Structures are given as structure tokens and as C-alpha cells.
Image (cartoon, rainbow, N blue to C red):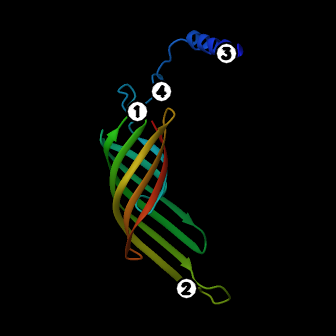
Amino acid sequence: MRRIPVMIIAVVAVLLAAGPVSAQYTTRADWNRTSDTMEGALGAHFGKLGGHGLAFRFPLKWYLYLQVAGGVWHTTDDKRHNTGVQLDYILRQDQRLRLYVTGGAAYFYHKERAGIGDVEPRPWNLDENWNVGGGVGVEYLKGERWSLQFEADFVHDGGKEETKLVPQVGIYYYW
């Protein structure tokens, strides 16, 4: 029974010797820091509203961001490219988290050789469509300059003529 009071005294002594705990974000960058505004970003984005591939984020105002994303994937029998544009309006921002609403449009192009065999020339199948929509997203500042982006968007898929809720994700490096 004597061991329990001795352990309590030891734990209290260690805690008192440790001193005061400082805030963790004092040396790290955050969204609200005026000395380092982290204005633009380069990264990768994947979504039916914002496009797939390389992405750039530019601030139009401190609360409004323009995002442009796209990619090109071409082989001999398969040609794909896409471009997406989004506007993100920040609703709430703290040190590490941004909540925003978004709206945008994307163009997807897919041209692929049809059939297999000796029939030459093989015909091309073409699938192209425009997607438009909007939704809500969060962006989390991870470390000094890296951020992760997650969205839930209602997208009208022009190729399928349907509207559905789809996720989007992105990873960015701010300069």
C-alpha cells in the first residue's frame, strides 16, 4: 500500500519539474499568419468536378481561391485528357482547418480504339462530356506548407445525364 502514495508523489514531481507547456503552433505556419501568407499552391487533385491531375490554387481574395486542374494520358490506342476549374469560397478558417463552399466545371475527353483483331483501321470510340456542380469541402494544413483537401460535391455528369454526390481529394504544397 505504501507504493501507491510514493508513485503519486513521483508523478506529481515529474509534472512540476516539466514546467509550463507552450502552444504547439507558435513556431509552425498557419492559415492566419500575416508574416507568411502562403498565397499559391501546386499539387494533385482528383475529382469529377475539379479534374484529375496537376492542380494550381491561386488566391483572388483572402477568402476566395481559384483552382485549375487537369491531366493528359495518351497511348497509341487510348487518348484521355481533362481540365477542371473551381472557385472556393472560405466560410471558416482557423489555424489548421478551412471550411469552404465550391462550384466549378470540368471537361473530360476519352478517345479509344474499338475492337480487337485484324480489322484495320480500327474505329475510334469517342466519349466527351462536361460536368458542373458544387458542394462543400475542408482543407487541412499538415505541417508547415502541405495541405490535404476533401470535398463532397453534387455533380451533374453531362455524359450520363445524371446528378449525384461524389467525393474529391487533393494534396497541395503552398509557397
Q: Secondary structure at mark 2?
A: loop
- Circle nearer the N terminus (2, 4): 4
Residue 123 is tagged as 2
Q: Secondary structure at mark 3?
A: helix
Q: Secondary structure at mark 1?
A: loop
- Residue pointed to by mark 1: 95
Q: Nearer the viewer, mark 1 or mark 3?
A: 3
Quarter of the picture containing the C terminus is: top left
Q: Residue furthest bottom?
A: 119
Q: Using the numbered discs, state the Cα–Cα distance from disc 2 to disc 4 in whole angstroms.
A: 56 Å
Q: Nearer the viewer, mark 2 or mark 1?
A: 1
Q: Which is more toward the observer, 90 or 127?
A: 90
- Circle nearer the N terminus (2, 1): 1
Q: Is residue 164 above or below residue 25?
A: below
Q: Is residue 111 left or right of residue 95?
A: right
Q: Is residue 8 above or below residue 67?
A: above
Q: Using the numbered discs, state the Cα–Cα distance from disc 2 to disc 3 in whole angstroms.
A: 80 Å
Q: Residue at x 67, y 15 (%)?
A: 7
Query: Residue 14's x, y, as percent?
Result: 61, 13
Q: Is residue 77 above or below residue 147?
A: below
Q: Which is more toward the observer, 57 or 28?
A: 28
- The amino acid sitting under disc 1 is Gln
- Residue pointed to by mark 3: 7
Q: Nearer the viewer, mark 3 or mark 4?
A: 3
- The amino acid sitting under disc 2 is Pro
Q: Using the numbered discs, state the Cα–Cα distance from disc 3 to disc 4 in whole angstroms.
A: 36 Å
- Circle nearer the N terminus (4, 1): 4
- Residue pointed to by mark 4: 28
Q: Using the numbered discs, state the Cα–Cα distance from disc 4 to disc 1 in whole angstroms.
A: 10 Å
Q: Residue at x 37, y 32 (%)?
A: 37
Q: Residue at x 43, y 44 (%)?
A: 139
Callouts 3 and 4 close, C-beta under 8 Å: no
